[in-house]
Amino acid sequence: MDIQQNLERIREKIRQACEKTNRNPDEITIIGVTKYVTIERAKALVDLGITNLGENRSDGFLQKYEKIEKDATWHFIGTLQSRKVKDVIDYVDYLHSLDRKSLAKEVNKRAKRPIPCFVQVNVSGEETKHGLAPEEVIPFIEEMEQFPNVYIIGLMTMAPHTDNEGEIRQVFRKLRQLRDEIMEKGFQYAPCKFLSMGMSNDYEIAIEEGATHIRLGSTLVGNEWK
Ligand SMILES: *Cc1c(COP(=O)(O)O)cnc(C)c1O
C-alpha cells in the first residue's frame, strides 16, 4: 500500500469533513499510528511530513523512538502500566491514555517536565474499553491540580465497535460536550482544549464532531507487519 496515495486520499476526506462543518483543516493533527508496521515504514511516513507518531505499547514505542527520535513528535496512545512509566516518560511528548489516579501519580513522580496529557474517557461504556466514565472526569481533573507534571490538554476516546454511524457520532459529540463543560470551568492547570478522537474507520465523523487529533493506523500505513 502506497503511503503517499493513502495520505492524499485522507487529506481530501479531512478537507471535505472540514468543509461540511466550517472548520479549518489546519486545526487537525494527524497522528500516524505505527504499531502495526516496521521502523522503515514509520520513517517513510515521517519523510512524507507526518511527524506525529503514535504507539500503544512501551516496547514498540521505545524501538521506534530509538531509530527515529528527534525527527518525530511522540504520542503514547495505549494503556500504560504504571511500572512502565519510568521507561518511556522521558520520550513521551503527549500521553493520550491517562485513565487513573495511580498513573497520574507515577507520571508526576517520574517526569522531569510537565507532560501534556489527554484524559481517556469511556463514553460508550463498553466493558472492554479503558477510560473513566464521563461523570468521573471532572472530579478526576480537579484531583490533578496536585500533580504539576500532569498537564491536562484534552480528552481522548475510542468509538464503540459498531457500524451504526449515529451511535459513533453520539459518542464523539458527548466527548466534545464534556470538553466544553471542562473548559468553562477555566482550570488553570488543565486547559483541556483538545479532542483526540477518530481512527481509520471513523475519523471523518470525529472531525465533524470537533476532533483536533485523529489517530490513523491501518488506513494510512496498513496493518500488516511488512
Ligand atoms: C491502534 C490504535 C489506533 C489506530 O487504529 P486504526 O483503526 O488502525 O486506525 C488509534 N488509537 C489507538 C488507541 C490505537 O490503539
Image (tube, rainbow, N blue to C red):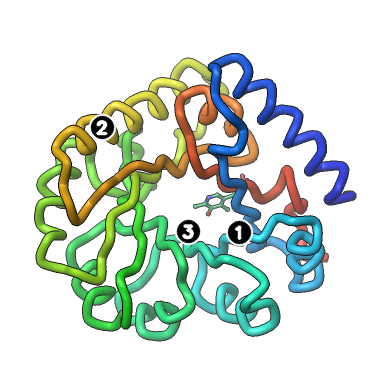
| Residue where numbered disc 1 is placed | 52
| Residue where numbered disc 3 is placed | 77
| Residue where numbered disc 2 is placed | 178
Image quadrant where residue 34 sits? bottom right
Q: Between label 2 and label 3, give the one nearer the viewer.
A: 2
Rendered image: mark on residue 182: none
Instruction: Give the answer, above or below, for where 176 lies relative to 216.
Output: above
Which x, y percent locates residue 5?
Answer: 87, 42
> 29 left or right of 182?
right
Instruction: Give the answer, above or below, for where 44 lies relative to 159.
Output: below
Separation of residues labelled 3 and 1 (CA atoms): 12 Å
Amino acid bearing label 3: Ile
Contact check, label 3 and label 1, Cβ < 8 Å: no
Identity of the residue drawn at 81% across and 42% down: 6
Identity of the residue drawn at 22% across and 60% down: 100
> 35 left or right of 167?
right
SS state under label 1? strand
Indicate yes or no: mark 3 CB to ligand 1 under 8 Å: yes
Indicate yes or no: mark 1 CB to ligand 1 under 8 Å: no
Amino acid bearing label 2: Leu
SS state under label 3? loop
> 59 left or right of 44?
left
Identity of the residue drawn at 47% across and 39% down: 197
Q: Between label 3 and label 1, give the one nearer the viewer.
A: 1
Tag 2: Cα neighbours inside 10 Å, few (<14), some, or many (≥20)? some
Q: Earlier in the sequence, mark 3 or mark 1?
A: 1
Quick one: 226 or 179, which is closer to the camera?
179
